[in-house]
Amino acid sequence: MVMRGSLLNNNRRTVQRLRQMIGPLKIKLLLCFCIAFTAILLLTSASFFIDDSTPSLDPNSSHSKGYAILINTWKRYDLLKQSISHYATCPGLRSIHIVWSEPDPPSYSLDKFLHHLVQKKNSRVELKFDINHEDSLNNRFKEIKDLDVDAVFSVDDDVIFPCSSVKLAFDVWQSAPQTMVGFVPRKVSVDQSQSQGNKDYYTYSGWWSVWWTGTYSMVLSKAAFFHKKYLHIYTNEMPASIRQFITKNRNCEDIAMSFLVANVSGAPPIWVKGKIYEIGSTGISSLGGHIERRTECVNRFVAEFGRMPLVSTSMKAIDSRGVWFW
């Protein structure tokens, strides 16, 4: 009887000890489960956050396929040859479109020389003459329906930018394809001394105003990237009175394009710092009264658009690998 009682007491103590051990074990297991479950939730939510906030650029999209160069020229064949010889070597280039508005078509020798030159430099680049029968500055923004890329690099025949600078501008444009990305900034500001009542008067300013104030509101299309859709809008949807004014006055087509892009996008342009090599000696900007005529264009276009669409900014894109301080 004594042994049986002692055995029962021992069994009870063992059960109690087991219960005491199992209790904390359950709590530990429950805590481990909660921690593991929470970790899984955090990892899952983090992956969704990353996917939503950092979309990758589709390598098969037309944005990433490259760009087309739209080069404006007028009876400066030596400059045209230099420009095409240079840009044909730039990576990412898919086609070159020469805006031709001269009375006579390009000569057979010029056509043959340029095609041979491009094939020698880069056989994958297509060269085309876009022949126009009317002499108008609007021709540089005439719609090109067979473009297989979205990015258009508009450039004059008398300026050359290193391929590295063009690539930087193209990379920047890919991050903001709805706006203009270019190398030549200009400033448009309100002139309070000439404004009357609720009607603002605007003044066009050149490079020194940009340098002094650190702000700008447009980049010139003499060296700028923009989406090809703006060629269609310029040709088919912009007020015809603006195009007529440009044809008559032979000026301000670049201001009109800047107005158009800003009006559609609601965003400021982006200035990219790059080396500029001027290979021409004369141009419209060298003529007397240039700033006054540009100011007239700005105020006329404001009236046509019904508002001032240009957005001022102080942002500048720069390749930090090439500077000491950034």
Image (cartoon, helix red, strand yellow):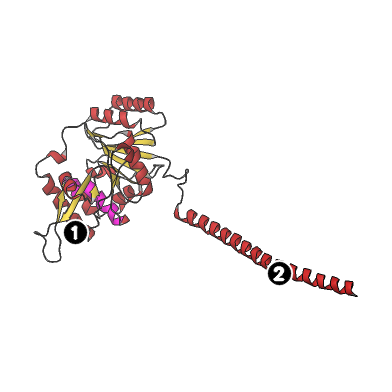
Which segment is the magenta one? 245-264
Q: Is residue 35 left or right of residue 273?
A: right
In the image, residue 201 above or below residue 132? below
Q: Is 326 contained in the magenta span?
A: no
Q: Nearer the viewer, residue 58 or 78?
A: 58
- In the rendering, at what x and y percent does residue 263 appear? 28, 56
Look at mark 2 in the image and give the residue it sits on. Answer: 20
x 38%, y 46%: residue: 174
Task: Judge left or right: residue 161 versus residue 92.
Answer: left
The residue that appears at 66% across and 63% down in the rendered structure is: 29
Instruction: Give residue 95's quadrant in the image.
Output: top left
Q: Is residue 255 magenta?
A: yes
Q: What secondary structure is found at the residue carrying circle 1? A: helix
**SS label for mark 2:** helix
Per the rendering, the mark at residue 303 is 1
Location of residue 20 with respect to 100 vertically, above or below? below
Asked whether the viewer can see residue 213, the reply is yes
In this view of the protein, which residue sits in the foreground, 324 or 82?
A: 324
Query: Tag 1: residue type?
Result: Ala
**The disc labelled 2 sits on which kind of residue?**
Gln
Query: From the viewer's perspective, is 47 left or right of 150?
Result: right
**Residue 85 spot, x, y in % from top left:** 31, 28
- Of callouts 2 and 1, the N-terminal one: 2
User: Is the stretch drawn in magenta largely helix, strand or loop?
Assistant: helix
Q: What is the distance, in whole Å, between disc 2 and disc 1 at their CAs?
A: 87 Å
Q: Is residue 90 left or right of residue 77?
A: right
**How many labels sit on residues?**
2
